[in-house]
Amino acid sequence: MLPGPVHSFKRSPEVLVPSDHFTDIGVIVNYKEPGIVDSIEFGTPSSPVFRGVALFNQTVDQARLFLQSQDPTLEVDSDGFTSHVLGVAVYALMPDPEAGEPGEVVSVGAFERGYYDTGRLEPA
């Protein structure tokens, strides 16, 4: 249903249903058996918007603060942040103030409830 060419691939040999990468729009759709969508990843040139906020237009700190305002239990680690409540994960190059690097939101994932409980790869 998405435009442009699609490249199907397996994230790992254990994955039973290949993912679809819509290369022109920067979207990867991941599936569980028997071919049901369980997560969608957005990278450039897509422009994911969550509750009116264009996440790629935010700094890493702005995106984190916005998602924390929506979910105080937001999990933050060295690869980004995840809200199990909202079903949103952000993969980011985290800021390094000592090196003068502001960080960058690299991708945004939307996932179904229980996605991380299944032992799947994390969206990124």
Image (cartoon, rainbow, N blue to C red):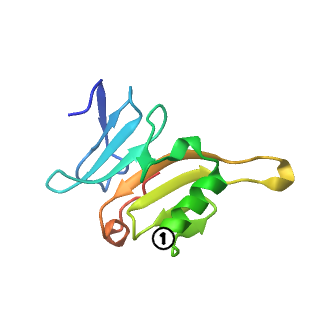
In the image, 115: left or right of 31? right
- The residue furthest left is 34
In the image, 55: left or right of 65? left
Q: Where is 106 relative to 66, above or below?
A: above
x, y percent for residue 17: 23, 49
**Disc 1 crowd, CA 10 A, few/some/many (<14, 14-19, 20+):** some
Q: In which quarter of the image is residue 15?
A: bottom left
- The residue furthest bottom is 73
x, y percent for residue 114: 31, 70
x, y percent for residue 29: 31, 44
In the image, 63: left or right of 40? right
The structure residue drawn at horizontal position 43% and vertical position 46%, both measured from the top left corner, is 49
The amino acid marked with disc number 1 is Asp
The structure residue drawn at horizontal position 52% and vertical position 70%, both measured from the top left corner, is 74
- Count every numbered label the image shows and give the total: 1
- The residue furthest front is 52
| Residue situated in front as seen by the camera: 64 or 3 | 64
The quarter of the picture where the N terminus appears is top left
| Residue situated in front as seen by the camera: 37 or 14 | 37
Residue corresponding to mark 1:
71
Disc 1 is placed on an element classified as loop
| Residue situated in front as seen by the camera: 51 or 75 | 51
The structure residue drawn at horizontal position 63% and vertical position 54%, both measured from the top left corner, is 62
The structure residue drawn at horizontal position 31% and vertical position 56%, both measured from the top left corner, is 14
Q: Where is 79 relative to 101, above or below?
A: below
x, y percent for residue 26: 41, 34
Q: Quadrant of residue 66?
A: bottom right
